[in-house]
Amino acid sequence: MLERVMIISGESSGELYGSLLAYSLKSLHPNIRIVGVGGFRMQSAGVELISGISGAFGLTEAFQAYKKVRDTFNKVKNALVSFKPQILILIDYPDFNIRLAKKAKKLNIKILYYVSPQIWAWRSSRIKTIGRLVDKMAVILPFEEAIYKEAGIPCEFVGHPAVDEIKRLIEESGYSLDDIGSENLKKKVRLELAISDSKTIIALMPGSRPHEIKNLLPVMSDIISELSKNNHYNFIIPVAPNLDAKHLVLFDSLKKRFPDCCIISRDAIKSLITSDMAVIASGTATFQAALLGVPMVVIYKLSPLSYFLGRLLVNIEHFSLVNILLDKSINELPIMRIKELLQNEVNKDNIIAEILKISEDDKHREMIQSVLFKIRELFINKNASIRVSELIEDLYKS
């Protein structure tokens, strides 16, 4: 019987996927014990936390978090011996998780890697190491399956867990995935969030990592300051889980500065459902917006050193997940791409120019929504958390 599982995530999005998986596993095995690395969502799903997530990203940011990551690794390594999980589930976070997989392999623990490292973007040689260590890959992007199968590694495209979360929240509101984009659903959620229907709503999503908030929240404040002058817009800003008090204060300060047009939310999905457009830090939120058909501008800023080294190492034309999917999984050409702004391009003038184009140019907005629909069609009939639970069961029995 499957009794002991360990789930390791390293950041906010992976922690969400870990929580959804934990709920699914416990529905199949009520007495299962799950330990792992995550945040309050995994803990709420019944996972006994060995340590919290680090939130580090980028090379210089990772150096700053080194001690915390090292201490977490030692705790998890010891837990592999004391807890002896029957299956170890690794969620993304490759530098940490591949090292941990080497320890687990020596202990003859079966390993399922859920959410692939971005080997298609950089450090493709890692696939050889993964192939030696991992018993099964469960990937969340459709083009990744062929990469692993060509390397002789057992792999399945399971869908994206963000779809599971969206489906659950929409069904709780009394609707279904077929209602995405409908005015009725939008009005229902706006009512839940006490938001007026009379203005255009823009979601501002500065990310979940401390350095993202530090780099991107100030320019979002500039956007509110400029666009609130004409009184046509309201702004909703979801606060990422697992943020510490120091960063939560920044959101409270923004609310106090713009009390009449700035809404702080604890729910990213509902914030997007209620929005007419969004400005989003590159990451999982761009994919959530794509699934919900929300036109967006994607922005990102790293430290100068991280950006310089990243340009040397990363081999992709676009940096946002939404455009990467359009590049690699949609074969119709020519096809438009979502507006991306990087580093010094991230300023209020560039962002507002695209916001106004989305708002005022019907054809432009409709073209964006048409490509987002194509992305949704790749994922809509999958249920990642349930399928991964089935793969874990199969792996245990094999």
Image (spheres, helix red, strand yellow):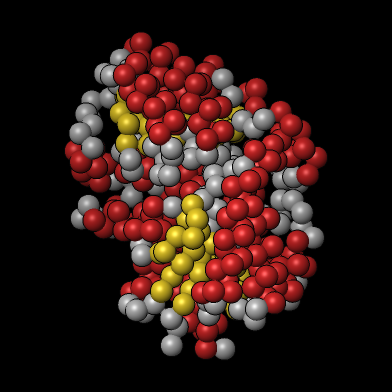
Q: Is residue 220 above or below residue 68?
A: above
Query: Compared to 249, does 165 lie above or below?
Result: below
* Viewer-proximal residue among 15 and 341: 15
Query: Residue 251: x percent and y percent?
Result: 38, 27
* Depth check, front residue: 335 or 65: 65
Q: Residue at x 67, y 30 (%)?
A: 303
Residue beneath the point at 48% across and 26% down: 217
As drawn, is 176 to the left or to the right of 341?
Answer: left
Q: Residue at x 49, y 52 (%)?
A: 52
Residue 43 in sight from this viewpoint: yes
Give the answer, above or below, for where 314 lies relative to 210: below
Q: Image quarter for residue 44?
A: bottom left
Q: Quadrant of the N terminus?
A: bottom left
Where is residue 324? Give x, y as percent: 62, 48
Can residue 372 be seen? no
Looking at the rendered structure, the number of numbered marks drawn on it comes to: 0
Is residue 233 toward the left or the right of residue 396 in the image?
Answer: left
Position above or below: 390 against 38: below
The C terminus is located in which quarter? bottom right
Report the side of 202 relative to 210 (left or right).
Answer: left
The residue positioned 54% from the left and 74% from the top of the image is 82
**Residue extending farthest top:** 229
Closest to the observer: 219 or 277? 219
Residue 207 horizontal side relative to residue 98, left or right = left
Question: Residue 280's spot in the image, x, y percent?
Answer: 49, 35
- x and y, in percent, of residue 388 in the image: 48, 72
